[in-house]
Amino acid sequence: MAVMEKSNEISLRGEKQLKQAETLSLKAIKREGFKNKAELEKLIVKTTKEDLAVVNSYLHNYKEGSGAFKKDLISYGLDSSIISIGSYVTFPGIWDICFFNKHMLELETVRDNIFSTPILVGEYEFEDIAFADENKIVWMKVCAHEGFFQMELDEQAYREFLLYNIPHSVR
């Protein structure tokens, strides 16, 4: 999701939560651990402001210079990237999500360190990594610090994956 779309989503979520808080009884508010409606509303406003601050931080600090590494990663199979609040497996935070083409990236290189944090691709470090095919369909998402990956493969792609001898389970 693009950063500005996420900013709008955060604002709308805050507004919706405030409207919902207006409908709650004092008993329901206390059951959730708040003393009164004002305390709940204060938390909603604070949380919304903090989430929007993350977006503004990105807009002011992060965007400058983010293109240089993308040029370097083309030789490793970088297909595309998006800026997002949250990755495919982690929220919140500002993430520059890079999609690598499975036919260009040498999976043998990534395989050996795919669950190390950070994941190394060339000299660049990644926390979460996703792989997309030539149709930009994401076929693998990795959360290195959790030691977790999720793949969506057709039968032929799964047979190719088996050649790498990576331990896994199928759901």
Image (cartoon, grey):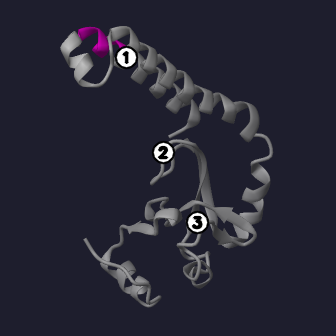
Taking the spot 36% from the left edge, 72% from the top edge, the residue there is 153
Amino acid beneath label 3:
Phe
Q: Is disc 3 surrounded by few (<14), some (14 to 19) or many (20+) residues within 10 Å?
A: many
Residue beneath disc 1? 40
Q: What's drawn in magenta, residue-wise?
A: 18-23
Dot in front, 2 or 1:
1
Q: Residue 84 location in percent, x, y? A: 56, 43
Q: Earlier in the sequence, mark 2 or mark 1?
A: 1
Q: Secondary structure at mark 1?
A: helix
Dot in front, 3 or 1:
1
Taking the spot 79% from the left edge, 40% from the top edge, the residue there is 64
Q: Secondary structure at mark 2?
A: loop
Amino acid beneath label 1:
Leu
Amino acid beneath label 2:
Phe
In three-dimensional space, the C-alpha distance between marks 2 and 3, rounded to whole angstroms, equals 21 Å
The quadrant the C terminus occupies is bottom left
Residue beneath disc 3? 100
Task: Tell me which secondary structure the magenta stretch mostly adopts.
Answer: helix
- Residue 130 visible in the current orientation: no
Taking the spot 77% from the left edge, 64% from the top edge, the residue there is 72
Q: Earlier in the sequence, mark 2 or mark 3?
A: 2
Dot in front, 2 or 3:
2
**In this orientation, which residue lies closer to the viewer: 110 or 75?**
110
**In this orientation, which residue lies closer to the viewer: 38 or 82?**
38
